[in-house]
Image (cartoon, grey):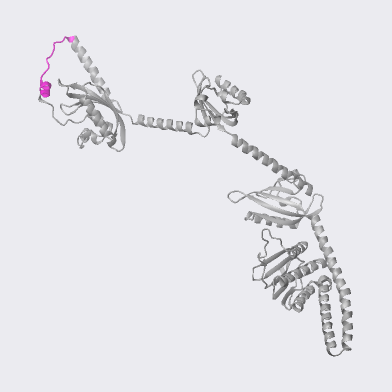
């Protein structure tokens, strides 16, 4: 596209343009030939002018206008000729600002050049509808005057936007491919039809500990470890015969220092018309870390399987619906069921639970569903042979990232024998208490009674200072006699057996009032039926221990004893005080060793089929509550003492 001239053509140029040319004399055949040639040239001009996405033009610098092609060039961008002429700088007004200076320089070089060369340049031109269109402008000088000044210019404008986009896409793709090749975290190599290496990326060089130049002297099979070459060579042979290779396969590389690397290989080839490999690419992903992790995982899994199967503790693995997935040998031995007899069943559908335990089992499972980490329980369970065993269980929930249960792990330990031995220890200790209490009552107590009687008689025969001293000694003997009586009653359950549980609790309250001069309030429901002498003794001992702790360790001034119904089938024995409380708030601290008294109370509560709760706040006293099962009765009467 020419630049408009700023000066009019010279008079010499005008005179030459106006002078008529001499008409040579030609024959008829020559005239027909000239007409045919003119017709063909006209058709050629029309083809050039009417070809889509390109325009041919002729511009006269003498007349300052397009002689041919102005409308077509303007139309390439959606303009009319007059619209271009009305622009401030004509065509330069719609050329992209970044291309204007270079295009002007191109035009100036053409106008000043002595030789009539072709000048070409891609430029961006603003479309009438908006947006820039890429076009390639090719132009040259067509006519000059005798002084060499340019008279006319011819040129062609071709739209190349699609070509430019394709070139840009190709450049982007090539850059991406280059980056992918060079920066790939896997080793990548290319090879020719003879499977000789053509290129190798930096990662492969690092994997094989060789530089690129050294690698390119090898074939594909050379980098494979000796023990793995046969399989790779079979794959390459299949490719030579035009067969497809596997999508991927595992093999082993050998680095320059002898190090072996497990890799996942993916090979792809480009075949020629004769089905021969022309080029190919091999991608090698290092599997060494994954292989090591897999090996460690397998070792850990094997260890867990050994621990699971050979542990003396019974293990069960359940899914999120509490359906049994797996049990170990200890569980099979404990309950007598083989794995295939119980796998796939819901936990509470397995014939090891007593009917009353099913509801408790479902309640514990609900607690896990609601977010509990684990639940513990001691459950009476039956073996396949019908034997009743006491099992201490812990069920733990393993959760997914969203908090839902993934699976459950339940462990069980047979504590039947341990509980029997513990009960025997309690029974023997209770018998020893009875023996010591009886010895105090029948031995020391009777002796003190006899001495007191003699002292009373002695006092009657004395006078003065001797009588006063004897009376003081008599008082001490009676005090010792009373203390011995209290100790013998405390050690012997005779008070409970003779008076019942409520009577025994009244005796505890009386001891607090008389011997310790502290307040003791009682609230007892006497309609709660006894579960038997042994149960009453256990409850009596729990109350005794709680009261002793309140007096000796808590410094309590007021104690409250109560026995009441908790719900339809449960009662609660409670001892509350206003002492200084427990430092741990009634909970065991990490690394602490709870007192033997508290552990004995908990054990006695478990023997009753109940449980113990201790609630305390520093400075606000302690409340010990023993919940235990009872028989149902209708009448309820509360007594206060």
Considering only vertical position in the picture, is 51 above or below 364? above
**Position of 584 compared to 150: left or right?**
right
Q: Does residue 394 lie above or below 260 as drawn? A: below
In the image, what residue occupies the spot 80% across and 68% down?
537
Viewer-side residue, 313 vs 608 = 313
Residue 92 point in image, percent of width and height: 23, 34
Left or right of 467 on screen, residue 355: left
Q: Pinpoint residue 518: horizontal percent, then vertical percent.
A: 72, 77
Range of magenta residues:
12-28
User: Between residues 635 and 531, which one lies in front from this camera angle?
Assistant: 531
- Residue 535 horizontal/vertical position (percent): 80, 66
Q: Which residue is drawn at 85% across and 66% down?
A: 432
Q: For this view, does 523 lie left or right of residue 266?
A: right
Residue 21 counted in the magenta span:
yes
> What is the quadrant of residue 458 in the picture?
bottom right
Q: Where is residue 381 in the image (x, y as percent from the top left)?
A: 77, 54
């Amino acid at each position: 596209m020419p630049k408009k001239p700023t000066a009019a053509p010279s008079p010499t140029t005008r005179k030459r343009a106006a002078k008529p040319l001499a008409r040579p004399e030609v024959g008829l055949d020559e005239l027909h030939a000239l007409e045919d040639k003119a017709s063909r040239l006209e058709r050629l001009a029309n083809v050039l002018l009417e070809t889509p996405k390109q325009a041919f033009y002729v511009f006269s610098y003498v007349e300052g206008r397009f002689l041919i092609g102005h409308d077509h060039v303007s139309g390439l961008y959606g303009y009319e000729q007059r619209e271009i002429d009305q622009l401030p700088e004509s065509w330069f007004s719609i050329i992209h600002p970044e291309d204007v200076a270079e295009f002007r320089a191109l035009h100036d070089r053409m106008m000043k050049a002595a030789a009539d060369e072709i000048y070409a340049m891609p430029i961006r031109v603003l479309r009438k509808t908006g947006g820039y269109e890429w076009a390639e402008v090719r132009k040259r000088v067509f006519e000059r005057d005798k002084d060499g000044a340019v008279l006319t210019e011819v040129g062609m404008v071709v739209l190349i936007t699609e070509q430019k986009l394709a070139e840009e896409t190709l450049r982007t793709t090539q850059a991406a491919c280059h980056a992918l090749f060079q920066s790939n975290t896997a080793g990548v190599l290319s090879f020719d039809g003879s499977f000789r290496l053509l290129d190798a990326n930096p990662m492969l060089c690092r994997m094989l500990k060789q530089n690129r130049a050294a690698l390119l002297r090898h074939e594909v099979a050379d980098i494979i470890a000796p023990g793995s070459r046969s399989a790779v060579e079979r794959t390459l042979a299949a490719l030579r015969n035009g067969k497809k290779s596997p999508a991927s396969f595992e093999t082993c590389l050998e680095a320059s220092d002898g190090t072996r690397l497990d890799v996942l290989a993916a090979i792809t080839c480009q075949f020629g018309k004769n089905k021969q490999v022309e080029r190919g690419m091999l991608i090698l992903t290092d599997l060494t870390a994954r292989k090591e992790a897999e090996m460690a995982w397998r070792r850990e899994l094997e260890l867990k399987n050994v621990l699971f199967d050979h542990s003396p503790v019974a293990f069960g693995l359940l899914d999120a619906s509490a359906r049994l997935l797996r049990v170990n040998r200890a569980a099979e031995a404990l309950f007598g069921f083989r794995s295939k007899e119980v796998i796939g069943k819901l936990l509470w559908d397995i014939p090891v639970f007593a009917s009353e335990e099913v509801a408790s089992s479902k309640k514990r499972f609900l607690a896990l569903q609601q977010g509990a980490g684990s639940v513990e329980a001691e459950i009476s369970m039956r073996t396949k042979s019908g034997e009743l065993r006491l099992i201490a269980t812990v069920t733990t929930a393993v959760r997914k990232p969203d908090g839902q249960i993934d699976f459950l792990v339940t462990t069980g330990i047979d504590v039947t024998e341990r509980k029997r031995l513990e009960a025997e220890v309690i029974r023997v200790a209770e018998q020893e208490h009875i023996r010591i209490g009886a010895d105090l009552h029948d031995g020391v107590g009777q002796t003190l009674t006899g001495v007191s009687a003699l002292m009373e008689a002695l006092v009657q025969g004395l006078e003065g200072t001797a009588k006063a001293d004897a009376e003081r000694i008599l008082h001490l003997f009676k005090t010792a006699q009373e203390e011995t009586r209290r100790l013998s009653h405390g050690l012997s359950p005779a008070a409970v057996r003779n008076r019942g549980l409520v009577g025994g609790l009244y005796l505890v309250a009386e001891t607090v009032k008389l011997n310790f001069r502290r307040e003791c309030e009682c609230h007892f429901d006497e309609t709660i039926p006894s579960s038997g002498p042994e149960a009453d003794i256990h409850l009596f001992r729990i109350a005794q221990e709680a009261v002793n702790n309140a007096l000796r360790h808590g410094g309590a001034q007021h104690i409250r004893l109560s026995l009441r119904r908790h719900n339809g089938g449960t009662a609660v024995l409670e001892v509350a005080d206003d002492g200084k409380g427990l430092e741990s708030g009634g909970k065991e601290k990490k690394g602490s060793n709870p007192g033997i008294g508290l552990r004995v109370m908990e054990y006695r509560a478990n023997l009753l089929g109940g449980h113990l709760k201790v609630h305390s706040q520093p400075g606000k006293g302690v409340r010990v509550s023993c919940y235990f099962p009872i028989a149902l009765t209708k009448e309820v009467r509360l007594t206060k003492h």
